[in-house]
Structure formats: structure tokens, C-alpha cells
Amino acid sequence: MWIWKADSAKAVIVIVHGAGEHHGRYKWLRSQWISKGYHVVMGDLPGQGSTRRKRGHIESFDEYIEVIESWVIQARQTDLPVFLFGHSMGGLAVIRVLTEKNLPVKAVLLSSPCLGIINKPSKAVDTVAKVLNKVYPSLLLNADQGLGNGTRSEEMIKRDIEDKLLVKKVSVRWYRELVSAIKLAHRTTERFPDIPLVLVQAGNDLIVDKWKVREWFNKLPLIEKSYKEWPDLYHEVLNEPERDQVFQYLNHFLERFILEEGVQTIRER
């Protein structure tokens, strides 16, 4: 885990990357938040990036939950408001950690959270995977979504071709844990904390099922929640050519929240 500090910071943002990724792919987003006056906390999830674990493998989705919890606790040491951001599978992990743990998070930002998969394995393959999960859970299978399915940006596609840290294979156990985590997220919406939520979703998502995302979002019993979909954008909305627009939308949400919180604090005094 690493922390990047802004001058005269007003809050801290914990960023959770998606499946097969690592914190280095969020350099642009990190710089944007820092320029707006936010500290940024990031790390690599178990089995991904530069972590010293079997790549693409976990024994339990709880490993992600525990790591994210530790990042949030570390972020809280700054004595600043903590915001939690998660993309894709990282968004799913953020959802799971917030339903399982009582964390000092002021608001949540999600980007195309993995609440449903478009290219699911066939029923036959899925059945075999259930068996292998018991007898050979660490068996690695190809999980490459294909270049160009995540973003339309040629710059990003070229960067990914040259990125040696991307995980292209995942274990049978990893896949079964992902499926279980998705099901749990849909079944436990009533346990999601009543804190402000903003969700930005790719309208032309080739990886995550946006209809499942909408279904989950609509069931949330939150006082304040916001859903914004960009019709033409691919899965990685913050790596798309229009990423500045997406970032401004997220930043506006946080700036308004901080302003309202500041007014409330003054009145309480």
C-alpha cells in the first residue's frame, strides 16, 4: 500500500483496482485527485500487481475485504474524511467490504462495478469449474478479456500491451469466489451502509452486465445515491477518451459533499 499526499488536503481517497490490474494503471486518476486537494491511498490486491502471492489466485474473497479494510484504516490515520473508490471487480470488493465491515467511510464512488458478467462460461464449463474448485482450486485458466474490450483509447491499449504486471490467467477458486461475491452483493443490499453513493457506468460495457448493475443500484435503500451512464463509453470509463468528463462528474459529487458537510459542521458548532 502507498499514500500520495496533496498540499492542504481536504480528504483522502482510497482507490481499489479491478481484476487483473494493479495500482499503476491509476496514475492519471491519482494525479487528478491530488491536483484537487485529496490524498490518495492505493495498493495491489492479493495475487495481482506486485504482490508476493500466486498471481491470479485467492483462497477466499475475504482476502480482498481484509486488505481494503486495512487501507481504509490507514487512510483514517490522516484525520481527514475518507472516500472509497472501486472499479469493476474492485467496485464489487468495495461493496462487499462495506456490507461486512463498519468502516469510517464518508461516501462511495463506483465505476462499472462487477455485479454481473457478460461473457459467462458455458454451463458445461461452469459445472467442471465447480468440481475443480474442490480438487484443484489453484488451476489457472485464461481470463483475458481481449484488447479493446475495456477501452477505446489507443493510448491505453498500447500501454496494456506493454504492461507485464497485468494478470491474464485466474484460478478456478478465484472465479468461484467472484461468482459467490456477486450473488452476495445482490442478496445483501439492505446491509449496505446509508452513506452517499455515486456510480458511473459504461453504457457500452463489453465486460460487466450493466443491467445487473442497474438492478443492484435500484434496490439500494439509500437516502442519497446517484447513477450516471455514458451511452458510448466502454468498461473503463476513466480510461476512455472522455475520461475528463467522467472525472469532473465524480469530482463535482465530492466537492458538493464536502461543502455540505462543512456547512453542517459550522452549524453544529
Image (cartoon, helix red, strand yellow):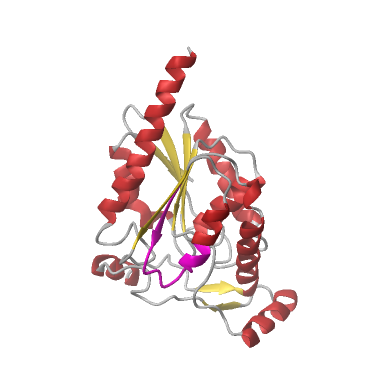
**Which residue is at a point 30% across and 37% down the rendered structure image?**
36
**Which residue is at a point 44% across and 27% down the rendered structure image?**
261
- Number of on-image labels: 0
**Magenta stretch?**
198-213
> Is 167 covered by the magenta stretch?
no
Q: Is residue 94 left or right of residue 37?
A: right
Q: Residue furthest top?
A: 269
Q: Nearer the viewer, residue 235 or 70?
A: 235
Q: Nearer the viewer, residue 82 or 77?
A: 82
Tell me which corner region of the image, top left, top right, bottom left or bottom right, holds residue 130: bottom right
**Which residue is at a point 49% across and 46% down the rendered structure image?**
1
Q: Residue 225, image x and y in percent?
A: 47, 45
Tell me which corner region of the image, top left, top right, bottom left or bottom right, holds residue 259: top left
On screen, 12 above or below 220?
Answer: above
Q: Residue furthest bottom?
A: 124
**Which residue is at a point 44% across and 60% down the rendered structure image?**
112
> Is 200 covered by the magenta stretch?
yes
Q: Is residue 109 visible?
A: yes
Q: Residue furthest right?
A: 134
Q: Nearer the viewer, residue 155 or 209?
A: 209
Q: Residue 210, image x and y in percent?
A: 46, 65
Q: Residue 238, image x and y in percent?
A: 33, 56
Q: Residue 212, image x and y in percent?
A: 53, 65
On screen, 11 above or below 16?
Answer: above
Q: Nearer the viewer, residue 173 or 242?
A: 242
Q: Is residue 66 visible?
A: no
